[in-house]
Every structure is written in C-alpha cells, then in structure tokens.
Amino acid sequence: MYYAAMRSIASFVPKRCVPNAEFESTLDTSDEWITKRTGIKSRYFAHDDEGSSDLGAKAAALAIERAGLSAKDIDLVICATLSPDFMAMPSNACLISTKLGIADVPAFDITAACTGFIYLLSVAKSFIESGAYSNVLIVGAEKVSNVLDFSDRGTCVLFGDGAGAAVISRTQDKAESILDVHIGANGAYSDLLMTPQKSSDGSGGKLQMKGSEVFKHAVRTLTADVLHILERNHISPTAIDLFIPHQANLRIISAVGEQLGLRDEQVIITVQKYGNTSAASIPMAIDEAYKTKRLKKGDLMLLDAFGGGFTWGSALVYFGGAPYNG
C-alpha cells in the first residue's frame, strides 16, 4: 500500500520588509493599533516586477533540493494562490514548472484562499495513494499586495507576500506519512471575504473583508474542525509535537490554542514577522519551525486553516524530511 510523505519544506519571501510604522503616514493607524489587534509587526511586499510565480519558483527549487531530488523527478505540480500572475491562464503552476525546467508533466492551480496549502495536501495525498504519481510538488505562492486596497486600514495592514513549497512523495511507511486531511467549504459566506472582479470602470479587484464576522466564524470553525480530526484519529492534543495554524491573526491562533489546551511550546507563530500570506502561510510557518530546528523528522504536526469561500481544513502530518543543515 502506498502512503504520502512530506519529504521537504521550503519558503521564500521578497526582500522588502514593511514595518507597521510605514503605514502611519498614509492611514489613520499606528504600530500599537496594528500590533494590539493582530499581533503583526511587519510583512514583506514583492517588487513590481516580481510575480507570485517568481516567489513560488524560488521556494519550490529549494524544496526539491532539500528532498534530494531534481526537477526531472517531479511528476505533478500544483499551486494554490489567490494572486496569480495572470487572471485565468496560464496557471501559476505552469509558470513555476517552466521556471524550474519541469516539462511534460501535469500542472494546475487551485483556489482555496488561506486554506490553499491544506487543500494541496489533500490533493497530493490522494494522487500519491492512488499510485498515479510518485513525487508531487505543491506550492503556496502569494503576492497579496497586488489585490490590497491601501486606503483600507482594516485589510491592507494584515497581509504580506511570500511562498512556501513542499515535495510529497510515495512511501510504504505509515509512520512518516500524511496521516489524515480534512477539508470543507461553505459558499454561503462568500460575501464576508472576497476579491470582486474589476468592473468596466476599473473599480473592484481589491480584497474586501468584514473582519469581525470572519473572526467569529474562523474561531468556531477551526476549533470544531481540529477537534474532529483529532477524535477521528484517536489522538490527544497533548500528543501533537507542533500545532502550525494559518497565520492570520494572533488572537485567532491564541483562541484556538486555548480551547484545545495546547502548551505554548507546541504552537508555531510567525504572523508577527510575515503577516497573513494566505496560501503560503502554513508552509512558511512549517519552514520557520524547520530552520529553527523545532521541527524534526518523525514529528507529528497538526495544521489548520480558514479562508475566503469560506474554506477550511486541518491535517495531521508526520514530517518525513531530512534534518535541517543550513
């Protein structure tokens, strides 16, 4: 029987770091206001000539290297993004494949907003376990700054740009596998978090969010979903090595962690450095844990995310990568 294993993790952020103070000259806001409500201190924005596929390709190249593979070993590429380089086609996955020298293998994008990486895990797991593919490259890549309204202090201070990637490979060892993934969606709440299509007068196309309502749904949904996947696998929260949630807001992360009874040392928090990087958020946080050697081979990770759609998901993943060596 085939299982799917996370063989590597990697991330990439653009060079430009934007501290909270940079917004003080253009918005009625302050570092104190942003930090108190979100936990965010800074984020990174890509340059005009950088697309989300550029960020994704750099993270993906490192993920392939860390997996001990080459581009020719990859037989499927999937990208999750809400900020692709092109509106409909070509997909970011096709662009990333070309930039890596991967040709003649399937490549496609999915749109699940901030839950994108967990959706990617679910798709990759299914393809691997079916026997269809051996090494699947999954990439969460975002240039959210492209869809931000920089006159709206309720949204533009929350997001950042970046990418995270992983190689999911075939294994026969269940102890190093993606143990379980659960995903869900409810389009009835789509108006609470969306990027409307541009109209003929050029308006629209910018992210809109009803923050307080999204917060309430997120805490309730994430807690229920995490409890469900733990109960389904007969795993106690105390048995989790690392809880790595979507990095949207420190208050949401804290609320879910408290309801699960998790210890501080179990929880990975990177929102203060990178803000909300949507589909890139979870792989970037996993890579942060990996590079700081908090994540080791064999560790059991609990992942969860909530995003526009609404979409949500959780995953139990044993890390099957080699130790970090710089």
Image (cartoon, rainbow, N blue to C red):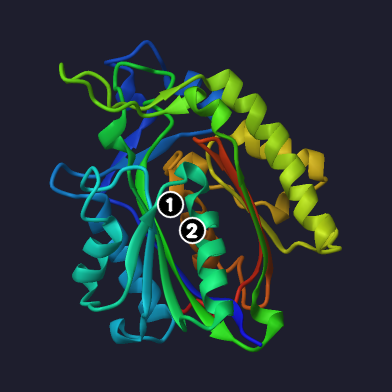
Q: Give the quadrant of residue 69.
A: bottom left
Q: Which residue is mark 2?
A: 283
Identify which residue, 125 or 272, lies in the foreground. Answer: 125
Q: Secondary structure at mark 1?
A: helix
Residue at (42, 44) in percent of width and height:
277
Please give the label number shown on residue 280.
1
- Tally of numbered discs: 2
Residue at (36, 43) in percent of width and height:
82
Residue at (49, 43) in percent of width and height:
114
Identify which residue, 267 or 222, lies in the foreground. Answer: 222
In percent of width and height, residue 238 lies at: 83, 58
> Do residues under tags 2 and 1 come within 8 Å of each other at their CB atoms?
yes
> Seen in the image, is 301 located left or right of residue 281?
right
Q: Secondary structure at mark 2?
A: helix
Q: Give the quadrant of residue 94.
A: bottom left
Residue at (56, 70) in percent of width and height:
126
Please give the label number shown on residue 16.
none
Q: Is residue 242 visible?
A: yes
Identify which residue, 322 or 177, lies in the foreground. Answer: 177
> Seen in the image, is 137 located left or right of residue 35?
left
> Seen in the image, is 238 located left or right of residue 163?
right
Compared to residue 26, the image places residue 13 above or below, namely below
Single out the residue that lies furthest toward the left: 49
In percent of width and height, residue 8 lies at: 48, 74
> Seen in the image, is 189 located left or right of residue 298?
left
In percent of width and height, residue 81 lies at: 37, 49
Q: Amino acid at mark 2?
A: Pro
Q: Amino acid at mark 1?
A: Ala
Quarter of the image with the C terminus in it: bottom left
